[in-house]
Amino acid sequence: MGLKQRFDIVLIGMMKAVEGLAILGFICAALSLSADAQAVVTTITLAVGFSPAAVAVNPVTNQIYVANDGPGGDGMVSVINGATNTVTVIDGATLGVAVGNDPDAVAVNSNTNQIYVVNYGSNSVTVIDGATNSTTTVPVGTAPCAVAVNPTTNQIYVVNFGDSETQAGTVTVIDGATNSTTTVPVGTLGGSPLPQLVAVNPTTNQIYVANNISNNVTVIDGATNNTTTVPVGTGPNAVAVNPTTNQIYVANGGGTVTVIDGATNSTTTVNGGGGRIAVNPNTNQIYSVGGITILPNGTNISNVTVIDGATNATTTVPVGTDADALALNLNTNKIYVVNECTWIGDICSGAGSVTVIDGATNNTTTVAAGIISDSVAVNPVTNQIYVGNCGCTGNGSPIGSVTVISDPPEFTVVPSPSSATVTAGQSGTFTLTVTPQGSFTNPISFTCSGLPALAGCAFSPASVTPNSSIVTTTLTITTAAPTASLAPPFGRRSSPLCAIWLVLPAMLLGTVGLAAPKRRKLLSFCVVFLLVSGCLLQVACNGASNGGNGGSGGGGGGGTGGTPAGSYTITVAGAAGSTQNTTTVTLTVQ
């Protein structure tokens, strides 16, 4: 076999190896993508019912209540067992007592295990006993549309639209112990204020009703039912309370949020938002849907305005198309924004989705949901998220469903300090605080990457187990000091034996001309071989004589320069099985 043939075989072998590695890379990438696609654990299709309008969760019993229309407009409530995802339907056919027509909102008092379903079409509230699923009907005002519960006083507040021509809006107050009612007028007298939503501050026992037409908020004193009117922006349509700071946030249709000081009823206006709104009292961050971002392809993407409750500074986070609802998980500090779908005329061209916002970073991920997703609720105990999907695309009878998203509990890692400065040879230490989110109890181990040369890291303890409480570990980063070894007074010289090897090719070169013609070619190859070998050997001899001087800055043979000076960003990773979170520390070496 000739030399060229051997070379071709080696080249082909190398190409096949590269091809195999490429194929392996594609397989790994595909496996990675498929793992991400499994964020949605199950999609539940409700046994009966169309157009889910509202979802509420009892985290104590792990029962989920979905208000939806039944055949012919009769309302029903589907009860999902959060542990098994089985569905029980409360309607006239199943349990003998139907909920009212057009159920439009639902709220839970987890202290009493009573569920309140607002029936817009029949001017009533259906009270469901969570222990037995038996029901009681309570008459309320005209066109009830929203409900909120004060679990401390066991009072339930139902907002009634009223008749815009003949009847002003009201709030019906239901006593949870007796189901007796009291009516409280809201809004500006002399016309319908069209109250839309209500929120309760259980700490101060104050109730806040957003009046869309009269551009104000009615404040109800829960102890006396006396009212105060606070002017806000144009078209208020949503309201949320931070009970910790006693600040109330009113989303106005004009693209602003009015902040009401609960102690004085004074107001401040913040630009941004204007749609559905929610508050995280733990972080003092407020989230309001509102505004759009137009992508280069012409697609309109909804935004969420994040308000810092301490400064009223805002941040804009793009989410999905036609964002309509949102809910928070206070344990994990995640925000779930429901995006209905992409519309072309009157037809929904794609499934809805949920944008998950990380409250610590405002980074987002997207999870697929059903057709026309328009409601959401969170169980913070199980970290399950329930998304109501209308299914009404205009292409036939709507088929309602609930998408159940499993969002496993995680943890955060925060260093203190976040940076350190050391001299080469010293160590830097950092305390890593690990905070579990939700019910996270798994052991966490740590690694670090991005270390400078001749540096190492160690953790004490090497792993921690939160057990639902904050734990710490100490990170120590070690560096190496420069070292040097003494050289001979006049330096090292190459060994004379090494130079002799260069004489041999010269001697053979003189014999080439004397050799027989047939042997000259072979002898020439030998001479060339010896010349090359001799040069390489001479270089090796020189390297041995100068051993270790390269890069040591004149420190002498065998010395090292230690950890190089500079500023290094080191990534610290905490891992518990497939769950991993990272943070960074900065180490400056002088």
Image (tube, helix red, strand yellow):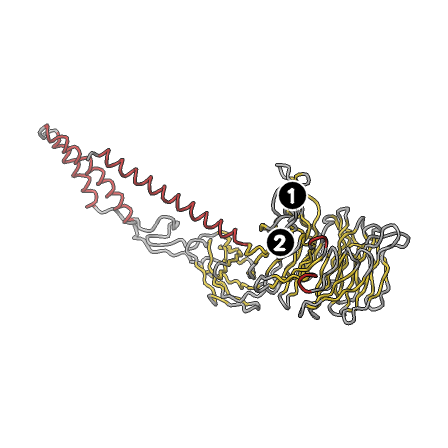
> Can you see residue 90?
yes
Mark 2 crowdedness (10 Å alpha carbons): few <14, some 14-19, many ≥20:
many
Mark whose residue sits in front, 1 or 2: 1
Q: Which mark is residue 23?
A: none
| Residue 258 vertical position relative to residue 63 in the rendered view, above or below | above
Q: Which residue is mark 1?
A: 395
The secondary element bearing badge 1 is classed as loop
Q: Amino acid at mark 1?
A: Asn
Q: Amino acid at mark 2?
A: Ser
Asked whether, in this view, residue 369 is left or right of residue 561, the answer is right
> Can you see residue 284?
no
**Place of residue 540 in the rendered image (x, y in percent of width and height, measured from the top left):** 26, 45
The mark that comes first in sequence, 1 or 2, is 1
**Place of residue 559 in the rendered image (x, y in percent of width and height, measured from the top left):** 36, 54
Mark 1 crowdedness (10 Å alpha carbons): few <14, some 14-19, many ≥20:
few
Residue at 62 percent across and 66 percent down: it is: 62
**Place of residue 511 in the rendered image (x, y in percent of width and height, measured from the top left):** 11, 32
Instruction: Single out the residue that lies furthest toward the top.
Output: 517
**Place of residue 160 in the rendered image (x, y in percent of width and height, measured from the top left):** 81, 57
User: Which of the 4 image quadrants contains residue 14?
Assistant: top left
Q: Which mark is residue 401?
A: 2
Q: Nearer the viewer, residue 548 or 388?
A: 388
The secondary element bearing badge 2 is classed as strand
